[in-house]
Image (cartoon, rainbow, N blue to C red):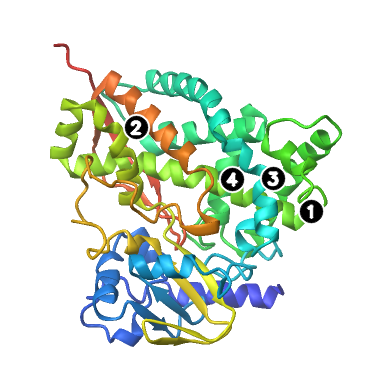
Amino acid sequence: MSEALDNELENSVMDLRDTMLGRDPDTIPLDEIDVAQPALFQADAFWPFFDRLRKEDPVHYCKESQFGPFWSVTKFNDIMEVEGNPRVYSSADGISIAPVNTSALPVEMFIAMDEPKHGEQRKTVQNVVAPKNLAELEPLIKERVGTILDSLPVGETFNWVDRVSIELTTQMLATLFDFPFEDRRKLTFWSDVATTQPGPEGLVKTVEERRDVLLDCLKAFTELWNDRVNQPPRGDLISMLAHGEATRNMQPYEFLGNLMLLIIGGNDTTRNSISGGVLALNQNPNEYDKLRADPGLIASMVPEIIRWQTPLTSMRRTVTEDTQLRGKQFKKGDKVIMWYVSGNRDEEVIDQPYEFIIDRERPRHHLSFGFGIHRCMGNRLAEMQLRLLWEGIMERFDMVEVVGEPVRSLSTLIKGYTDLPVRLHPKKVA
């Protein structure tokens, strides 16, 4: 991508970012609604926009946005239809609403591929979360949960995102990659840089700065690759990629793309659900009382947290041939965005979707992990980490109290948090 195009993209982001924020979605002409604005998600102000689209125009066309024209699919069953038809709705042109090269690097990743290449590369690393490996990881995660929770200051205010959410998930990532443990926070930094918008409020100010950071990531992992490829195969992700038949000849930017996929997938879903669960229980104190009375509800609470949070807002597909959905005509090459955050609040499919209910009858009936061939392969690992964390919390603390406003991520892709101030209340003695 040329420097001029980089600058044009940055300027368009700044020009269009806030045009919906602070406006009443019911008074905006329907064809002017643009839900793909990072500021809407940072302000947690997008919900009424999706409510209106689900009700009045569930397959909605936005003709002008900072990311170009796109279709929004906002209802649960319509999203399932798109996910279930990868021949017509392709992933090969990218899976986020942002242009493929916003990092100014031509990265590739298997989640942004169609069959058969997608399946071949995914199969290479899928065993890292096989049931046998999860069973072996469980005591390690439980031990780390205990160490983290026991190190927290009781009765003092601290940032839950940094001390717990990031720390637990980054330790897990370092283990899965067999990445130098003392440098594990680099994984979080690289993930955040890849998923937030460049700009004055972002971690990086420009597209060029983002590119340089991601090249540092590639350099670090290339050194690990060169080490693993000359050793017998092992059980970590880098060794799996280095020795896998479908991945051992990857070009550097394809390696980087798959690294970012695995880092973001292993970090953001769990990390932001850890924070989102604490916030949800504080916003719904009756559910927190219910949990204190019966910690056995953790098993059903965990998938409800993941639905409630929906840490990945959306996924993009590109239409491969003229088709239609709900009577709307899609043209070949059209960009289609499946908004999971909206589908998970679809009242026609989910009973009381805006209610956080930790003992739902079907708590796993949600879209947060996707559906079909691209369903998140680490979903059971994410659930296990959340379960073990909440078991540890309930053993030690009467309450994790939120004592300030959360600070949310500036991103259209990741629905997450950068700061959640909390105070711990010790377990009451009977």
* Label 1 vs 3, first from the N-terminus: 3
Residue 261: x %, y % from top left: 60, 51
Front residue of this view, candidates 413 and 197? 413
In the structure shown, which secondary structural element does the residue marked by tag 2 occupy? strand
Residue 30: x %, y % from top left: 29, 85
Tell me whether circle 1 and circle 2 mark residues in contact (CB < 8 Å). Answer: no
Residue tagged 3: 124
Residue tagged 2: 158
Q: Visible in this render: residue 97?
A: no
Q: Which amino acid does label 1 sit on?
A: Met
- Between the C-alphas of marks 2 and 3, the distance is 40 Å
Which residue is pictured at 33% across the width and 39% down the height? 302
Front residue of this view, candidates 136 and 268? 136
Please tell me how crowded label 2 is: few (under 14), some (14-19), or many (20+) other residues with Cα within 10 Å.
some
Tell me if residue 326 comes above or below residue 41 in the rendering. Answer: below
- Between the C-alphas of marks 1 and 2, the distance is 42 Å
Residue tagged 4: 263
Q: Which amino acid does label 4 sit on?
A: Ile
Residue tagged 1: 250
Quick one: which residue is furthest to the top in this view? 430
Q: In this view, does 147 lie to the left or right of 263?
A: left
Camera-nearest label, 1 or 2: 1
Viewport quadrant of the N terminus: bottom right
